[in-house]
Image (cartoon, grey):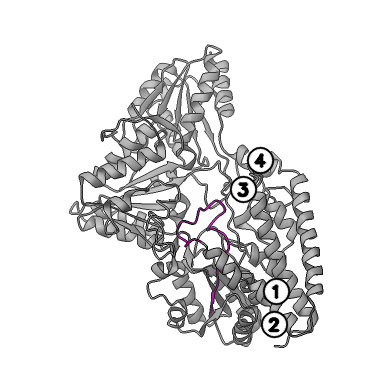
Amino acid sequence: MPQLSMRDAINQALHQEMERDSRVIVLGEDVSGGAGGTSGEREASGGIFGVTKGLLPRFGAGRVIDTPISESAIIGAAAGAALAGLRPVAELMFADFVGVCMDQIYNQVAKFRYMFGGKSTCPLVIRMAMGAGMNMGAQHSQAIYGLLTAIPGLKVVVPSNARDAKGLLIEAIRDDDPVVFFEHKALYPRKAEVPQEPYRVRFGEASLVREGSDATVVAIGRMVVFAEKALDALARDGISCDLIDPRSTSPLDEETILESLDSTGRLVVVDESPPRCSVAADIAALAATRGFSSLRAPVMQITAPHTPVPFSPALERAYVPGPQRIEAAVRQLVGTTR
Amino acid sequence: MQLDQARLLEIYRRMQTIREFEERLHVEIATGEIPGFTHLYAGQEAVAVGVCAELTDEDYIVSTHRGHGHCIAKGCDVPGMMLEIYGRRGGLCKGKGGSMHIADFDKGMLGANAIVGGGPPLAVGAAIACQLRRAGGGAGRVSVAFGGDGSCNQGTVFEAMNLAVVLGVPAIFVFENNGYSEHTGADYAVGSKDITARSAAFGMPAERVDGSDFFAVHAAMQRALTRARSGGGPSTIEAMTTRFYGHFEGDPQNYRAKGEVEQQRATMDCLKRFRAAVTAGGCITAAELATIDREVHEQIDAAVRAARAAPMPSEADLTSDVYISY
C-alpha cells in the first residue's frame, strides 16, 4: 500500500471528491496562489502548506477559487454556496483566523438546519491548519477544536494520521452538515499507508490505536503520536494501555471510551488545548458521569496550560503536552492504584 | 517642512537600521537559528520612517506581521527586538511574542499583529483616547494604523475606517501596497484596484504616494498629521512600494516574475533614492552616510551576537503575565 504524507492524503481526497462530484468547490487564500502575480504562473502556491496543489490545473479557477484575505467572506460565501446546492470546501489558512469569521461559523453555518426547521442543509467543510510546535507565536499556533466542539450544529474532526485524514475528509465532504476539519501542521509531513481508492471513515467512531489493560489513554490529533511514544516507553516496564483516538470530537464516540474505561479503571486524557471547557474536560466529565462506577482512580488531564501559546522555543516546548508528561501521568496513576 | 542636516542624517540612520536589520535576519534565518515565521520589511523603509518621522512617543501606531520596520521607525529598542526574534528572555516581550508580536508601549508602539486586519480597529480606539485627551486640554496626539494591501479587503478594516470617520478621530490609515497579498497579486485581490479611492469613499481625505520616495511619504504624512492634530479627523495614505523578499522567509515567490526583485532593487530602492537626493543637495556627503552605514552594521552585528548568547526564558515564564487559576 502506498505511503502518503497527511498533506498528500488530504490532497488526494480533495482530488477524488472533486472528480466524483462537480458540486465540490475549494476556496480560500492562496489555495492556488499567483492570481494577479507577475510571473504568470497560475498555481504559484497550491496552498501555504501545499495541501491544495494540483487542484487548479485539474479543475480550473471556477471551482478552485483564490480569495482576498477576507475570512468572513470566505466562510459566508462558502456557506451561501452550500445553501444553494454546492458542496464547498473552504480553507482558513490558520485555525487562529477563525476569530475573524466566527459569526459566519457559529451564528450562521452552525444554526441553519435547526433554525430553519430542517428545511436547509449546509454541506460545508471548513479546513484549517492548527497547532503549536513550530514557533509561530500566539496567533498562528492554537488548537481550538474545543471551542468549535462546543457549538451545536457543527461536526468537528481532528485526524491524527494520514490514513484517517483521507477517509475523514471524504466523509466530511459527503456529509450534509457543516464539518470543521482540523489539520495539525506538525502532522502534514508524517506518512502512513493510505489506500489509493476513496474510502470513508465514519464520524463518531473512535480508533483503538493500542490495546492494553492498565489504563485508558484518550488522545486528540497530534497527541496520539505523543501518546504512542509514551506507551512504547511504558511497555518496556510491562505497563500496557488502551490508546483511543476519537478522530471526531463532535460527534464523540462515548461508548468506545466507556467500554475501555470499564476494563482498565483508569483514564488519562491528552489534549493540546488549554484545560478550561476543553475536550479533555468534556471526556473527564463523561467518565465522572457515565463511567463513574468504572473509575479506580481520579481522571488525569494532560493539557496545555491556561495561557496563550508562547513564541520562544524554550516556552513552547513546555507548553505542548509531550510524551514524558503522558508517560509520567500513566505511571503515577497505575503506581498509586495498582 | 524643511528637514535640516541633522534630521536628514537621523532619518537615514533609521532607514538604514531597518535595512541592515532585515538583510541580516535574512542571512541568520538561513542558518536555522531563528525560530518561527519571519516576514521581512526590506524595500519598504521609506514608508515606516516617512510616516513615523514626526510622531512622538505619545503618538500611537499599530503594526502588522511585517512589523520590524514600523518598530524601528517608532523608536523601539533594536537589541530588544533582536532578542525577541531569537525568543530570548530579555526580548521586548520576554520572548513570548516573537517576530510577529513586538510591542513597546513606552514608544507608543501598541503591537505588531499576526491577524491581517487585526490592527486598524485598535488604532481607532487609541485615536478615541487621543481625541478625549485633546478635548481635556492635552496635545493633539494621533494614532496610525499600518496595514498592507491585503488588509484593505478585511471587514475589520472597513469597520475601523468608517468608525474613524463617524467619530472624527485622529486616526491615520497607512496602506503599504507592496503588490502582493501573501502569494496573490493585489491587482487581483483588490477588486477596484484602487485603495485610495476606496478609502476616500469612506469620507476622509486619501492620497496615493510613491512609497519608495521618503520625501513624498513624509509630505503626505505631514498633511494627514496637521489635520489629525488640529481636530480635522482621519486620513488615508496609500504608499506604493515593494518588498525585496517573500511573504515570509522561505517563500519561493513563484508568483513573481523572474528578475523582478533585482529590477526593483535597481529602480525602487528607497535608500538609494534617499542617498541620491540628500547628497545631490550638497549638504550631506557620501562619506557621512558611509559612516552611518558602518555604525549601523556594527550595532546590528552586536545585537545578533548578544541575542545568540542571551538566555532563553525559564519554564516559570510560561505561566506569568496571564490570569491563571490552575
The answer to whether marks 1 and 2 sit on the same chain is: yes
Dot 2 corresponds to which residue? B139
Circles 1 and 2: CB atoms closer than 8 Å: yes
Nearer the observer, A325 or B82 = B82
Chain of the residue on which disc 1 is drawn? B
Residue A285 in picture, x, y percent from top left: 43, 33
- Tell me the CA gap for discs 1 and 3: 28 Å
Going by the numbered disc 2, the residue's amino acid type is Ala
The mark found on residue A314 in the picture is 4
Circles 2 and 4: CB atoms closer than 8 Å: no
Chain of the residue on which disc 4 is drawn? A
Q: Residue at x 63, y 65 (%)?
A: B110
The mark found on residue B58 in the picture is 1
| Camera-nearest label, 1 or 4 | 4
Residue A12 in view in this figure: yes
Circle 2: element type: loop
